[in-house]
Amino acid sequence: MAYEANYNNFTDNYLSYNGQYGISASSTSSNLYFNNSFVQNSVGNAYDSSTINIQWDNGSLGNSWDDYVGSDPDDNGVGQPVYTNIAGGAGNQDDYPIYWDAPVISVVSPVNNTYFNATAPTFTISVDEGVNDSLWYMLQSDANEYNFTSPSFQINQTAWDNAVLIDSTVTITLYVNDSRGYTNTTDSIVVKDPDAPAIAINEPAENNTYNFNAPQYNITILEGFLNNSWYTLGYNQTKHFISANSTGTINQTEWDSFPDGNITIHFYANDSAGNLGYNNVTVIKNTTAPNIEILSPSSNANVEVTAPSYSLNITAININATWYRIWDGTAWTTNYSCSNSTGTINQTIWTSVWTPLSHEDVIAIQFFVNDSVGREANATVQVKKYAPPSTNGNGDTPPADIPDIVVIIIIVGALGAVIGVIVVFVKSGSGKEVERIDKITDEL
Ligand SMILES: [Ca+2]
Ligand SMILES: [Ca+2]
Ligand SMILES: [Ca+2]
């Protein structure tokens, strides 16, 4: 075509499926070719060996070439770079190749398979090779289109909340179109994981007591995307990393560093989305034996038939039980549980012990305490039964310096009638026992 043809304008032609070139411009001059379409010409789209004023564009518009490689990022219909694939050696080119491409949307962030928690992800996208006319996205299993304008935007929170799959991937499809309606799309795959790991502490149990040996633990973690799990002791910050669903022994060195008392073990687990799960258990460290001291009754106190009260001073890390028993001079009673501070001896058992005894007989009361690891301590106090012989009829106490035997005979004579009162006091040599005998005789 156009052999030895000069001063021609070739425009608005569709040059396709030719057995040779679409246009072969040799031995020609001063021809202008623009706004033609070259499609699948078998040897090549154009041949140009002329050197005299052959133009493949009119200064603002060239031709459409099916082998053009370029882009049109400003959407003006002219591609860049220039088209140079013209055979023949003339070195001519189309400076304004007709070209249009759809915009290309791509996701800058997040990368695929990034984990997100309950907060909807923020995206940053880029649109290349074109000017976007509108932008929107859709979520998997959601028929709604969500428009956005800024290249950085947050996924609609409600849509994220409603995304049906939890602890699974969610495909978010992003769309762009341009002023001619050319559309481009890309998929982003993210993982939705709104839930924190759930930690169950199977062992140790709350308030379990341990001595020198650090406790065993046994935990179960429910989490689809577990990242790390660990524990800390007390207010220490040291993380001891452990496996999920594991058993083991709490770090002995750190256990040793704690004094006796409550120690809280904090278990943590986080997932790939950054959710943090937490649970704790408080155990008791007890390496000290208990101690018990009887504040009252005091030693050798007189005790009467009314059961005495008692007061104890007990030091123990974790009291398990407190109890007492009573020595009646022959045997111990059985054990009776009691308060670990103050209280009163059981009246029934006290009466049964006290009653058969004599004045100033010794009664022993022994108190016990044990702690939750089974260590036991006890203390005993001896008291005396106080039940002196009855006083006289006026309730007066007999004088202390009475003789061993005092016989007072009062005789009131009145015409053969005698009223005699004989009072006999018998006092032992040691003075520890007093027996009083009252005898009233109303006749001689
Ligand atoms: Ca352009
Ligand atoms: Ca474009
Ligand atoms: Ca999770």
Image: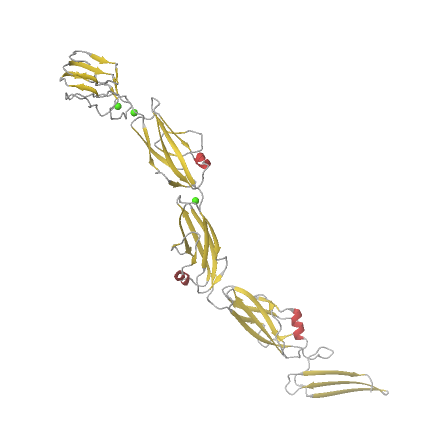
| Residue 439 sits above or below residue 33 on the image | below
| Residue 76 sits above or below residue 411 on the image | above
Relative placement, left or right, of 113 versus 330 is: left
Query: Could you say which quadrant of the image residue 362 lies in?
Result: bottom right
Instruction: Decide which of 170, 298 is in the foreground and name it.
Output: 170
* Residue positioned 38% across, 37% down in the render: 189
In terms of image quarters, where does ligand 1 lie?
A: top left
Query: Could you say which quadrant of the image residue 21 lies in?
Result: top left
Instruction: Decide which of 170, 319 is in the foreground and name it.
Output: 170
| Residue 91 sits above or below residue 395 on the image | above
Instruction: Decide which of 403, 373 is in the foreground and name it.
Output: 373
Relative placement, left or right, of 30 versus 235 is: left
What residue occupies the far right of the structure in this picture? 415
* Residue positioned 38% across, 32% down in the render: 173
Relative placement, left or right, of 440 versus 47 is: right
What residue occupies the far front of the structure in this picture? 19
Residue 173 seen in the current view: yes
Spot occupied by residue 108 in the image (x, y as percentages of width and height)? 32, 35
| Residue 52 sits above or below residue 410 on the image | above
The quadrant the N terminus occupies is: top left
Relative placement, left or right, of 138 versus 76 is: right
Residue 119 seen in the current view: no
Spot occupied by residue 11 in the image (x, y as percentages of width and height)? 24, 14
Instruction: Decide which of 225, 368 is in the foreground and name it.
Output: 225
Q: How many marks?
A: 0
